[in-house]
Amino acid sequence: MHEVSLAREILRILQQQARERGFERVHRVHLELGPLSCVDPEALAFAFGAVSAGTLARGAHLELHRPPARGACRLCGCGYTMDSLVTPCPRCGGPGRILSGLEMRVRDLEVSGGDPGTSREG
């Protein structure tokens, strides 16, 4: 299950950001997850809960944002929304090239700590 490795990488990013930005707790992680990324959102949330236990992100909510995947036709250049890795061009039926939809990125965080009573997003 590669979701465990992905959850560990998210936690690594959170720990790095905590060192750089001086917060102590993560309450919510806004994660952008492309629909073509082949990641099971439920498995990722479960894995994140498991790997974050006992860390600065213990009990943090993983909020997933799923922007549409975008592609462009290799033949006619038409831009379109992709439903799968091989969605053909709606204009000419040609093969598509993926422009977005494979990514996974931490978009922003809701955190506290460092200075008493602070709460930040960013």
Image (cartoon, rainbow, N blue to C red):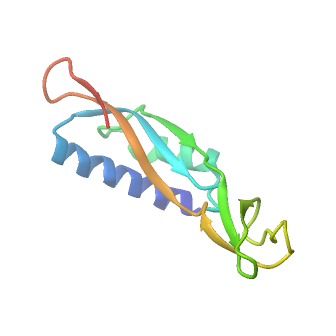
| Residue that appears at 29% across and 38% down | 56
The image position of residue 101, as x and y in percent, is 61, 60
Up-down relation of residue 115 to residue 83 (above or below): above
Give the position of the N terminus as an image quadrant.
bottom right
The answer to which image quadrant residue 85 occupies is: bottom right
The image position of residue 19, as x and y in percent, is 17, 46
In this rendering, position of residue 40 left or right of residue 15? right
Up-down relation of residue 73 to residue 117 (above or below): below
In this rendering, position of residue 82 left or right of residue 105? right
- Residue farthest to the left? 115
Closest to the observer: 42 or 64? 64
The image position of residue 57, as x and y in percent, is 35, 38
- Residue farthest to the top? 117
The image position of residue 32, as x and y in percent, is 52, 48
The answer to which image quadrant residue 27 occupies is: top left
| Residue that appears at 60% across and 67% down | 99
Give the position of the C terminus as an image quadrant.
top left
How many numbered marks appear? 0
Closest to the observer: 79 or 46? 79
